Amino acid sequence: MSIDGHPLTYLLHCQGWSANDYLTRLGTVHQRLGYGPIARDRKRVTRWTRGGVTPDLHAQKAMAVLHGIPEYEITARPWPEWLRPACMRDRELLDAEWTPATTIDLLDHVATTGGPMDRRGFLVVTGITPVLAGVATAEPAVANPHGRRIGATTPELFEASLAILRQQDDQLGSGQVHASARAQLHLIITTVKTTAHTEEIGRRLYSAAAEAARVCGWTAHDSGHHALAEEYYLVALRAAASSDDQAVTANTLAFWAITRYSGGDPRGAVDLVTDALGRTRSIGSPRMEAMLYARLARAHARAGEHRASDRALAAAFDAYDRARDRTPDEEPDCVYWVTLGELHSWAASNATDLGRPNVALAHYEAIPAAHRGEGYDSQAYPRAAALRLARTAEAHVAVGDLDGAVHTARRAVDYMGGVSSARGTSSLTDLRARLTAHNTVPVVQDFLAQTA
């Protein structure tokens, strides 16, 4: 049975329990908690799993005890999402100690069992706070005296390879890059386990492992596999904490935040980015600070928090102004892609989420000039261009400009050719759905027919 369905159905299947078996066990816990007996009508379980009925709070508390889930998780996510962690085969991802040895084993486990990208259905973590607490307790990587000794050249090669992977993801898309990122992660893990190295080299290897896992997480997310992405982000964060590399840690948190707010947890995304922003003083990168504030603005916008989103967005533009006079060598390589055009794109997405289509269009219209001013080549980043154009077209639809919507949509389709990205495909699907409401208009009819 797939874990993509209802989590309670999946749990019963894994345990081999019938509905009556489950109600018997649940009833025992229910009474032990002082809530009295629970009716053993098997249709009750069917209504919970298929009928859209939410169990009462007492029943949910009994379920949390039965499945070993902390009670506070019930309020962290809606029913039935808070049950999802009990479906995990790999609880150690959440519960294991934050030590280098444990981290490398977990990295190896996720990299080995995480493909092909088959886990779509849910986010792994319900509460972000315990994970961030784990980061604070993480033990740093240490020297390894066993094996063939390596020096600084080895982590330098990994760092160079990861920089190439980031650029390949931009141009080729996540579907093709994920396998390469996993292969790179396997090689780094093997190197950590089998070579002798100093503490400094060890930390750089853990940093490289964190970034490779982060790329795996991002490419999984971009392909629509949010659960798998979160598994990678968990182990990436562990490795980043052991590396004591603040830039890699902050970047991992920032990308994980995308999965959190995309999966319906904008508050968790806010917590992740807030933690990352606390690291910016030691990083000393205005460009990274701009990226983090932009992520924070997106999370607040997804939560419908107008003022908080606007404040964070203003901070993002302010930070980017401070980055303009800096050379690429003065910034972490992982933020090479953060541009003024990207900030306007995020600002436009925020405005769309907050019901301000005219504001969104103003930001979209500012992007070409920003790109020209910075020498940005949209052809080199087809996925980003396609996503931006699809969202621009949606804003045109929202203000009633169907000619502008179709013109922009055609450009988005052109950019998507040959790039593997579930986000890009889903954006175009969403756009087509919006245009379908206007399918009596000839220009819309033609577009829908040509892209069917």
Image: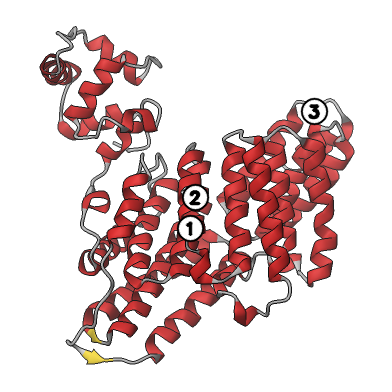
Q: Is residue 113 left or right of residue 332?
A: left
Residue 99 visible in rendering: yes
Q: Quadrant of the N terminus?
A: top left
Q: For numbered disc 2, what is the local secondary structure?
A: helix
Looking at the picture, which amino acid does disc 3 mark?
Asn
What residue does disc 2 label? 257
What residue does disc 3 label? 439
Residue 417 visible in rendering: no
Q: Is residue 42 left or right of residue 382?
A: left
What residue does disc 1 label? 276
**Mark closest to the chain's N terminus, 2 or 3:** 2
Q: Quadrant of the C terminus?
A: top right
Instruction: Judge depth for marks 2 and 3 and give the one in front.
Output: 2
Looking at the picture, which amino acid does disc 2 mark?
Ala
Q: Going 50% across and 66% down the picture, which residue do you hit? A: 177
Q: Percent x, y for residue 100? A: 24, 69
Q: Quadrant of residue 171?
A: bottom right
Q: Going 28% across and 27% down the picture, which residue do you hit? A: 9
* Label 1, label 2: how far apart the Cα atoms are: 10 Å
Q: For numbered disc 3, what is the local secondary structure?
A: loop
Query: Relative to the observer, which residue lies in front, 138 or 201?
Result: 138
Q: For numbered disc 1, what is the local secondary structure?
A: helix
Question: Pointer 3: residues within 10 angstroms few (<14), some, or many (20+)?
Answer: some
Q: Percent x, y for residue 124? A: 35, 44
Q: Going 72% across and 52% down the picture, which residue do you hit? A: 345
Looking at the picture, which amino acid does disc 1 mark?
Ala
Q: Which mark is residue 298?
A: none
Specify the color scheme.
secondary structure
Query: Relative to the observer, which residue lies in front, 112 or 33?
Result: 33
Tag 1 near tag 2, CB within 8 Å? yes
